[in-house]
Image (cartoon, helix red, strand yellow):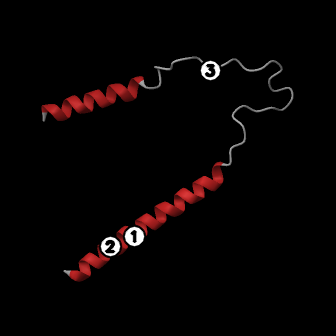
């Protein structure tokens, strides 16, 4: 039980400090930022990857349900 508390405390410390321990500050924005309509971060197509991830999650969940029903029928 004490080992579990140590592991949990260490994990919480790592999670709490992970965002504050950055090696470098981000670079300053270029001059005239925003006046030309440029946006930072680019235009990554997040939607396509999101639908692929949701499809894979649905397939995994369907497989789990199928295996559970198959196991219940065998008993």
Residue 8 to residue 54: above or below:
above
Q: Quadrant of the C terminus?
A: bottom left
Q: Earlier in the sequence, mark 3 or mark 1?
A: 3
Q: Is residue 30 left or right of residue 63?
A: right
User: Whole-percent x and y of residue 34?
Assistant: 81, 27
Q: Which residue is mark 1?
A: 63
Q: Residue at x 31, y 31 (%)?
A: 11
Question: Helix or strand or loop: what does disc 1 sit on?
Answer: helix
Q: Residues within 10 Å of mark 1 (few under 14, many from 20)?
A: few
Q: Quadrant of residue 69?
A: bottom left
Residue 49 to residue 70: above or below:
above
User: Whole-percent x and y of residue 25?
Assistant: 59, 17
Q: Residue at x 28, y 27 (%)?
A: 10
Question: Helix or strand or loop: what does disc 3 sit on?
Answer: loop
Residue 3 to residue 68: above or below:
above
Q: Quadrant of the N terminus?
A: top left
Q: Is residue 44 left or right of residue 74?
A: right
Question: As drawn, which residue projects farthest toward the left?
Answer: 1
Which mark, residue 26?
A: 3
Q: Is residue 75 left or right of residue 20?
A: left
Q: Residue at x 68, y 48 (%)?
A: 45
Mark 3–mark 2 CB contact (< 8 Å): no
Q: Residue at x 64, y 48 (%)?
A: 46
Q: Which residue is mark 2?
A: 67
Mark 2–mark 1 CB contact (< 8 Å): yes
User: Whole-percent x and y of residue 29?
Assistant: 73, 20
């Amino acid at each position: 039980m004490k080992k579990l508390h140590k592991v949990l405390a260490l994990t919480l410390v790592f999670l709490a400090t992970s965002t504050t321990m950055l090696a470098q500050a981000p670079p300053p924005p270029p001059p005239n930022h925003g006046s030309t309509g440029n946006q930072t971060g680019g235009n990554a197509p997040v939607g396509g990857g999101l639908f692929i991830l949701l499809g894979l999650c649905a397939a995994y969940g369907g497989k789990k349900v199928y295996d559970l029903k198959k196991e219940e029928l065998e008993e």
